[in-house]
Amino acid sequence: MNYTTDFKVLVTRPEKQAENLCFLLEQIGAKPVKMPVLKIVAVEPIAKIREALSDIQQYQWLIFVSANAVNFALSANNGKIPNLLGSKIIAIGQATASALKNVGIDVDLVPKQGFNSEAVLALPELQQFNGVACLIVRGQGGRELLRETLEERGARVEYLEVYRRMLPKVDTNPVYNLLDKKELDVVTITSVEALNNLLKILGSKKLQLFSIPLVVISERIGKMAAELGFKQIIISQQPTDTALVEAIQKGRRSVRSN
């Protein structure tokens, strides 16, 4: 289904990660409205990450939680993750697996369904982990479910945090104007933190968001959005840009045709 360019979609991905989604939206004739609500930056000092990566052979399992985890780990260590021969690699989601494969790192396990901690914990290979050493490569903060559950199963689990999320400074005026004119058709959100940041950035204007279709990438984000007051929530089948666009197409507001 193609739209005219007056069909406007709020894209809230970090600036450097929004290009492909915006391109796909333009391909269906929609107008992407970019307002990044997260900024992803490297954790300092870089030397600490390098030191951890140089000693990575002590872990039997490495779990990369996102493509950002892969890319920032590589960036901190001159594009390489050495000493992986004795470790098995788990990627949470196909985008993470692709980021690893693109740099020549073989991935041992990727959940076939789901792209979160629950999906990883359901893998048969992770049910008995007594005495196993695991390293979770991730950003600062986030959920503790993966670590806590693996420790309950007997694993020794440590974190390597390679990036952090920040609240960016953005120009809100274009979005304010669209909200006032009721010309914003769909809002996209890809994490709970992004959802909270969006509401924080828009301040009192956030109330105008709640009647606009919201496209999210998981049941967990959808539940949070409903609790916050969003009325029309569409859950993408996958966290990919293609799946987001498919969900966005389902979310076109019917108000204009009434």
Image (spheres, rainbow, N blue to C red):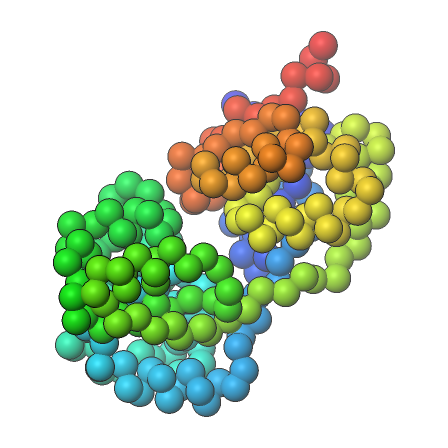
Indicate whether 163 appears above or below 122: below
Please tell me which residue lies in front, 14 or 109. 109
Q: Residue furthest front?
A: 152
| Placement of 65 over or under 208, stated as above or below | below
Image quadrant in which you'd find residue 2: top right
The residue that appears at 79% across and 54% down in the rendered structure is: 171
In this rendering, position of residue 146 left or right of residue 16: left
Whole-percent x and y of residue 7?
67, 29
Q: Residue at x 31, y 87 (%)?
A: 54
Q: Position of residue 112 (x, y in %)?
A: 25, 44
Q: Please state if 163 lies on the left or on the right of 179 as rendered.
A: left
**Residue at horizontal 43 percent and vertical 44 percent from the top:** 239
* Residue 143 place in picture, x, y as percent: 45, 57
Please state if 48 lies on the left or on the right of 216 as rendered: left
Residue at 24% x, 47% y is: 122
User: Is residue 231 among the parts visible in the rendering?
Assistant: yes
User: Where the C terminus falls, by quadrant?
Assistant: top right
Observer-nearest residue: 74 or 26? 74
Instruction: Report x, y in % for residue 91.
Output: 30, 58
Residue 184: quadrant of the picture: top right
Establish if 182 lies above or below 144: above
Is residue 185 visible to us here? no
Rendered image quadrant of residue 51: bottom left
